[in-house]
Amino acid sequence: MFEDFTLFPEAASTVAGGIDRLYFFLIGMTTFAVAGILSALILFSIRYRRRPDRAAQQIDGSVPLEIIWSAIPLALWVFIFGWSAKLYLEIHTTPSEGMTYFVTGKQWMWKIQHPTGQREINTMHVPRGEVVILKLVSEDVIHDFFVPAFRIKQDVLPGTQYTTIWFEATKVGTYDLFCAEYCGTKHSEMIGSVVVMDPADYQAWLDGQPAGQDPVDAGRVLFENLRCVTCHDAGSGQRGPDLSGRFGRPTSLSDGRTVLFDESYVRESILEPKRRLSAGYQPLMPTYTGQVTDTQINQLIAYVKSLANSDVAPKGGDADGGNGQ
Ligand code: CUA
């Protein structure tokens, strides 16, 4: 029954060791405190027990003692805060370069799309030693993407906002993937696995999959079929902003704010185009909610992203949209 029992999940990502050190430090520190308090309790119970020949003595406090037992815990907590804040930033600062996977949570499964377009459900193949960036979104309720062996856990939200988490796997193997947010009747069945392979094996595995549609190509076709091109092309009379060279950069909004033109902004602009309007444009764009699937949104994002460095597209006179009005 207990053959597979391990006290701690395997540590299979670059951040796992850091999390474990903090965790063991906390365990060690609390164990030390418990041991100290308990032994003092027992010792004092015996030593100062009630005896007929001894009267209780009143003590009215001690300033040095109060300073000591305030200062030591304070220093300790500040130390732990600094340590964990550093770790938190390390885990939640996404590297600028990496393989971007799209993960969609849905009652009750995980849908995964590889950077090259291949798709999987509940199983996710990744190469070892590569930075993998996950763009997570939900089709219905809040889920939570949790891989204990990588020590990563990230809420997955419905709506227009992608959440992001990244990891770099260090060991070949198969690791559990859980949903860690109660999301309905079959929440406990919303499980899967992450398969870490040597880069060469991963490539071979990828080649053996049904060729996924290249997301950029698929996105380009959608961009035309959905008639996005009518307004978003440089030569279209500029009813909408020309999208080339925009991805990954700050962009000005009509209300004067600036926003990062990223995955979430593109998704929001497709689903709720009037919410954060590009500066200099009228709220003409209709919503595409219900007309595009999450997969198609991901493809459109891939296409728009591919335009990030396309300087070839001719820019219209005011195509930069940074001109206020
Ligand atoms: Cu999805 Cu719990």
Image (cartoon, grey):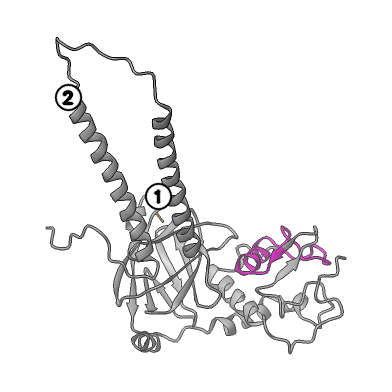
* The C terminus lies in quadrant: bottom right
Magenta run includes residue 274: yes
Residue 79 drawn at (x, y percent)? 44, 51
Residue 145 drawn at (x, y percent)? 42, 61
Residue drawn at (74%, 68%) of the image: 251
- Would residue 57 be found to the left or right of residue 238 on screen? left
- Which label's residue is closer to the chain start, 2 or 1? 2
Q: Are marks 2 and 1 in contact (CB under 8 Å)?
A: no
Mark 1 residue type: Tyr
Residue drawn at (80%, 61%) of the image: 254
Residue 107 drawn at (x, y percent)? 42, 57
Mark 1 secondary-structure assignment = loop
Position of 132 relative to 205 (above/below): above
Asked whether residue 190 is in view, the answer is no
Density class for disc 2 (Cα within 10 Å; few <14, some 14-19, many ≥20) is few
Asked whether residue 33 is in view, the answer is yes
Name the mark nearer the viewer: 2 or 1: 2
Residue 195 appears in which quarter of the rendering?
bottom left
Q: Is the shortest distance between ligand 1 and the CB of mark 1 under 8 Å?
A: yes
* Residue matched to label 2: 47
Region rendered in magenta: 259-286
Q: CA distance from mark 2 to mark 1?
A: 51 Å
Residue 14 drawn at (x, y percent)? 39, 71
- Would residue 55 be found to the left or right of residue 128 on screen? left
Mark 2 residue type: Arg
Nearer to me, 258 or 35:
35
Residue drawn at (53%, 78%) of the image: 97
- Would residue 62 be found to the left or right of residue 263 on screen? left
Position of 41 relative to 142 (above/below): above
Chief SS of the magenta region: loop
Magenta run includes residue 8: no
* Residue matched to label 1: 182
